[in-house]
Amino acid sequence: MKSVKQGAGKRSEWTLSRKILVAFLALACTATAVIAPPLFWELHEANKALRSFSDALIAKRYGSAYDFASKEFRATVEFSTFQKTHNELTARMGDLKSVEITHSEVKDKQDGWYGTAETSMDFSRGNLSFLFDLKKEGNSWKIYSYHEE
């Protein structure tokens, strides 16, 4: 009896649809490798700025927190109003204990980088949810606006 190797003489079965699928996957992987690192870096930096802002609020260093505000925020909210708002919030909810970023995202728009972050703020007398808008000014992320949800 003669033996026949399985698959001997058989051509590779790379169909047109398989070739298109592989080309699409290669393109998608390349695009992800090019786009994802800057996007993740900006997300990291935006979250870092928000954590620094939050840490200053927890420590009641309102001047330091205000330094993380964007030019637009400072143009509409004077420091005395900012400080009064946080003192009133502390009187109502107790001391701010921690801030957890529950969701955040950044986008590169035509006029620069913008981000949003949903947070859970833990006070001594309860939790509140706040939504933050952030904006990159030069090389630094700044708080553009925020409000209680």
Image (cartoon, rainbow, N blue to C red):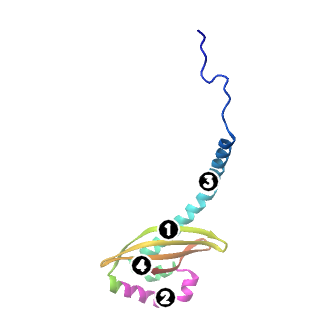
Q: Which numbered dot is residue 79?
A: 2
Residue 35 quadrant: bottom right
Residue sitting at 55 percent across and 71 percent down? 115
Helix, strand or loop at label 3? It is helix
Q: Mark 3 points at which residue?
A: 33
Give the image location of residue 14, x and y in percent. 67, 37
Residue type (three-letter) at the residue carrying disc 4: Leu
Helix, strand or loop at label 2? It is helix
Q: Nearer the viewer, residue 80 or 26?
A: 26
Looking at the rendered image, the quarter that the N terminus falls into is top right
Q: How far apart are marks 3 and 4 (CA)?
A: 37 Å
Give the image location of residue 86, x and y in percent. 41, 85
Q: Distance between the residues labelled 1 and 4?
A: 19 Å
Residue type (three-letter) at the residue carrying disc 2: Phe
- Residue 41, compared with residue 60, is above or below; it is above
The residues colored magenta run 69-89
Report the predominant secondary structure element of the magenta stretch. Answer: helix
Q: Nearer the viewer, residue 48 or 149?
A: 149
Residue type (three-letter) at the residue carrying disc 1: Ser
> Of tags 2 and 1, which is closer to the observer?
1
Residue sitting at 30 percent across and 79 percent down? 125
Q: Distance between the residues labelled 2 and 3?
A: 42 Å
Q: How far apart are marks 4 and 2 (CA)?
A: 13 Å
Q: Does the magenta stretch include residue 78?
A: yes
Q: Which numbered dot is residue 57?
A: 4
Lower sequence index among marks 1 and 3: 3
Count of labels in the image: 4
Q: Does the magenta stretch include residue 94?
A: no
Lower sequence index among marks 1 and 4: 4
Q: Name the residue under label 1.
A: 104
